[in-house]
Amino acid sequence: MTRIGFIGVGTMGLPMAKNLLKKGFAVTAFDANPEAVTAAAAAGMAAAASAAECVATADIVITMLPSSPNVESVYTGDGGVLAAARRGTLCVDMSTIDPAVSRRVAAAGKERGVRFIDAPVSGGVPRATDGTLAIMVGGEAADVQEALPALQAMGANVIHVGPVGSGEVAKLCNNLIAGVVGVAVSEAFRIAEGFGVDPKIVTEVISKSSGNTWVMEHMHPVPGLVAKAASSHEYRPGFMTDLMCKDLGLAVDAARALRVPVFVAPAAQQVYRLASSHGLGRKDCTSVYAFLKPSAAEAPV
Amino acid sequence: MTRIGFIGVGTMGLPMAKNLLKKGFAVTAFDANPEAVTAAAAAGMAAAASAAECVATADIVITMLPSSPNVESVYTGDGGVLAAARRGTLCVDMSTIDPAVSRRVAAAGKERGVRFIDAPVSGGVPRATDGTLAIMVGGEAADVQEALPALQAMGANVIHVGPVGSGEVAKLCNNLIAGVVGVAVSEAFRIAEGFGVDPKIVTEVISKSSGNTWVMEHMHPVPGLVAKAASSHEYRPGFMTDLMCKDLGLAVDAARALRVPVFVAPAAQQVYRLASSHGLGRKDCTSVYAFLKPSAAEAPV
Amino acid sequence: MTRIGFIGVGTMGLPMAKNLLKKGFAVTAFDANPEAVTAAAAAGMAAAASAAECVATADIVITMLPSSPNVESVYTGDGGVLAAARRGTLCVDMSTIDPAVSRRVAAAGKERGVRFIDAPVSGGVPRATDGTLAIMVGGEAADVQEALPALQAMGANVIHVGPVGSGEVAKLCNNLIAGVVGVAVSEAFRIAEGFGVDPKIVTEVISKSSGNTWVMEHMHPVPGLVAKAASSHEYRPGFMTDLMCKDLGLAVDAARALRVPVFVAPAAQQVYRLASSHGLGRKDCTSVYAFLKPSAAEAPV
Amino acid sequence: MTRIGFIGVGTMGLPMAKNLLKKGFAVTAFDANPEAVTAAAAAGMAAAASAAECVATADIVITMLPSSPNVESVYTGDGGVLAAARRGTLCVDMSTIDPAVSRRVAAAGKERGVRFIDAPVSGGVPRATDGTLAIMVGGEAADVQEALPALQAMGANVIHVGPVGSGEVAKLCNNLIAGVVGVAVSEAFRIAEGFGVDPKIVTEVISKSSGNTWVMEHMHPVPGLVAKAASSHEYRPGFMTDLMCKDLGLAVDAARALRVPVFVAPAAQQVYRLASSHGLGRKDCTSVYAFLKPSAAEAPV
């Protein structure tokens, strides 16, 4: 029986770890938040008192953490995974982070004989719960192969993109586009609305034309047009504004490090940021449509 | 036999008028550029010496002009269509212009007993030539019905969107999204490239995820991934950067008039504008990918 | 005694016209809003029942109107100034509008023997009341000379910039910069605040360095640093967000017509627009600082 | 005689270190680039073979490095300054970096009994050579006092802004504004030019109005208006586009970390980035004016 050390059993990590349990993996859990560990124990996992303890006897280490600095310190900090894991351990980081950090951690692992692949997910809490996440993987083919049974316990669609970091790159690129499209569709439909044109017909026209996008089809920001979209349910997430803001931030930062000029990505990022400032951070990201409302008529001179 | 007065027989208008001829309409042509009239005559149309002469005996007037001021002056200027056409004439403006201008011209027409609908097209010269344009129509149902045979001679997909101006609104909204997406996809793939990840695999990942768009599928900006895309043919248009810039300009102007805040649309508009300044105006708009190349390493301090 | 026909006696126009009266000009007033005419009459002006009546016997016509379309229709519409004024009349448009419209109206005037100059103002209601406006003038030198006594009755600083339209151009360029600076200073001080650094000392440092600007010195967006700034008085205008938005809109539109690529101007324009959507339209434009507040900590994953 | 260990004797660091020598400090130099060390030795400094050797006997350590990661690794890496310096040594980092990194290094120093202040400079190579840099300092008052003689050997204007990191914050805020203003002034003057209005007179008008800025007065981007400006000397720096891009990048990154929404700063950053991509990286940053040229007339339809 493969032993998994799972670090980061929060909103996303816990349902993912539960699916591993369900598929017969032995899971030991750790989280910086003790309540999360308690919840994991209640679900039948072994509870570890530290990251080091969590990974000491693991065959595979899985991490699901909020941000690049968390990943870097959990792996390379004092008492971190790279120091505590046995030589040959396979580490799978499923966090959404800067691909350069993935590569840095992988290189540090190599020096200590620990293998590392990146495997960020898409699909949010509902698909984490169902075990149907999309998982984009970067790493050596043999390592990806070895991780596959565990990944398939959590996701329905596992794609090997390329060398270490490539999973993160694919995710960032995807979310850059989706995030920008969310704002573009919102702007377009505010204009249609301003002209008094039926958004349902405009949606039909666009769906057959060059402006068609997955976001409009599945996450239409105008309430009432797509029954399953968050907009039709008071913008309950779905994919939160704050997460979209974070992912666009990673993409824009990566562009800076690569010296790639980007214009629509930072513009969209800042719109989500500002929407968050004005109370929409934990709503679905398509609530940006509500935020971009027209202003009242200008004051006469 | 329905008599058509066709004003504006340039790059787009001429092949459209030829398809009307081919389907048995009697076409009289006029253009501000005498060479265009000569070409129309060579193709078998009657040549008119003025807009007034062109429409004097027409059942249906069709206009295909470069910009809002052109449409406004051709219709409402001295010797314009509204003055010269017989009462009851049906005018079909197929230019891509500001929907507010369409409505203004329609109102002016109503005062003089002339009917007006807007019917902008999408598909470019190739589909104008094939008679397979997509046509988005705004106007009274009866007028749209009456224009249908002529429209179907030029296009394969005719959609009645709503009242006058609605065709333009649908087109602007569509092109706003497509134009922004073109920049977003370019930014994303420049980032993937900077990380050294295979763009083909990234394309596959995104095509099954939330970032999927018509533009990536059909107009992929990275050369060599989509055989029919302009990028695979040295960015020969396709849809020119200058036209995308114009359409985004119309959308942004409309937003201003409606007091709708827009962020990614003007950012994309200005990227196309700047690309045009640097020589890409008459290349396909996806050449923006080539324009957004990374800069060289920064100078050391 | 020079007879002035003054069209547009609203918030700005009325105090300007009063200063003309005070300096001994005979003023006949008209406004589309009858209450404004009543107020003008109460202040001692002759009341006209129409624009045509207002200008029929005037030596100089002055217009102070909200927007480009208003100016165009007041001058060139049916019963407009150009039709009603006597040959040789000098028209002075003090509205803030598109310079291309100024030129168009001037050309139309020339055809009818009516002279036209543009003379937009800066300084707002307080300086309109004091008669100390800054006035930027575009037109023939002789016409500007002839208008000078009237202009000096309303303003303290009259500058002849160049040919017709140049006054508007100078104003748009100035306000483009001031509007962008207002956002830039707000962003910078939000960052300083985020780091917990005293904004007063940061202001001192910047005031002696390359980031110094008139806006920071006189309209500092952070409350409490500049006693006379609107920020220190709950953002009471001052210069309203809606007006800044309008002026940036004119600048961005002009850029589009001239095919000049612009990036920071539309970004700033849209921030003011969105601030207006969220209730700050009639506050001072520096309230954009309040609008750009940081968001709360992101939700944990 | 105070012994200085100076790390980073490149384009900026060498002339700064020379001024210390000239004022009687004993300077030991190190640089990752051996040629830079040779040049320092030729100028009369002691050459160190490593950072550790450079700081081993220093009373004050000064660092002048290109970026945040360089500073972090030089201080906290293996064989770094914090490990090698004696307890009680005062470290003065004069690099332009992320204020959060300054604070992190200061905290790491405190643990090892080493003091740290940040003291970024402004003025470029000419003022580094003259010893007239502006220096913005963050740190404990006593530490700043102790560093003052050394700082005054290099700069003419030393300002203590606040606690550690505050010098960097002040510099970023200043450069954010200056960088945005550079683009705004360029956009405004491209518009004035498009209308054919004399830029000299527009400059005069703006210099007395709300759009006045230090950048326009001293670094006017239009050639020929300010004799000393880089624009009048083929955009020879001055302050390079790549450095402006870097500083705006630091400001935008800081905003992200602080969750402050920013719009004009990233727009300006990306314009400089793109200008660098197109060959202007080592020209003066005001060459952005040349880059923002209007496009040719659009192709007719």
Image (cartoon, coloured by chain):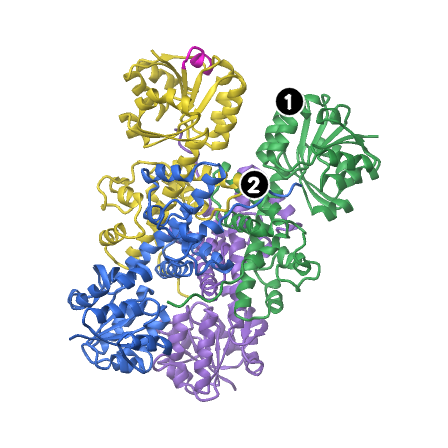
Chain colours: A blue, B yellow, C green, D purple
Check residue C250 in the rendering and tell me which mark sits there, or answer none: 2
Asked if residue B196 lies in the magenta stretch, the reply is no
Towards the viewer: C230 or B149 = B149
Q: Quadrant of the C terminus of chain B?
A: bottom left
Q: Quadrant of residue C78?
A: top right
Is D227 placed left or right of A240 in the picture? right
Is D93 drawn above or below residue B235 in the view shown? below
* Residue D33 visible here: no
Is D8 drawn above or below residue D197 in the view shown? below
Q: Chain of mark 1?
A: C
Identify the residue at horizontal 33%, vertical 75% (top origin).
Answer: A39
Give residue D172's position: percent from left, percent from top: 51, 65
Q: Quadrant of residue C15?
A: top right
Towards the viewer: C166 or B252 = B252
Q: Residue furthest bottom?
A: D87
Towards the viewer: D100 or C204 = D100
Residue type, numbered disc 1: Asp
Query: First in sequence: mark 1 or mark 2?
Result: 1
Is A243 drawn above or below residue A47 in the view shown? above
Is A267 drawn above or below residue B240 in the view shown? below
* Residue D150 visible here: yes
Identify the residue at horizontal 15%, vertical 75% (top origin).
Answer: A1
Q: CA distance from mark 1 to mark 2?
A: 26 Å
Residue indicated by mark 1: C78
Q: Give the magenta part as a residue range.
A: B51-59
Q: Chain of mark 2?
A: C
Q: In what element is the residue under mark 1?
A: loop
Asked if residue B53 lies in the magenta stretch, the reply is yes
Q: Residues within 10 Å of mark 2 (few under 14, many from 20)?
A: many
Give residue D296's position: percent from left, percent from top: 43, 36
Q: Quadrant of residue A88?
A: bottom left
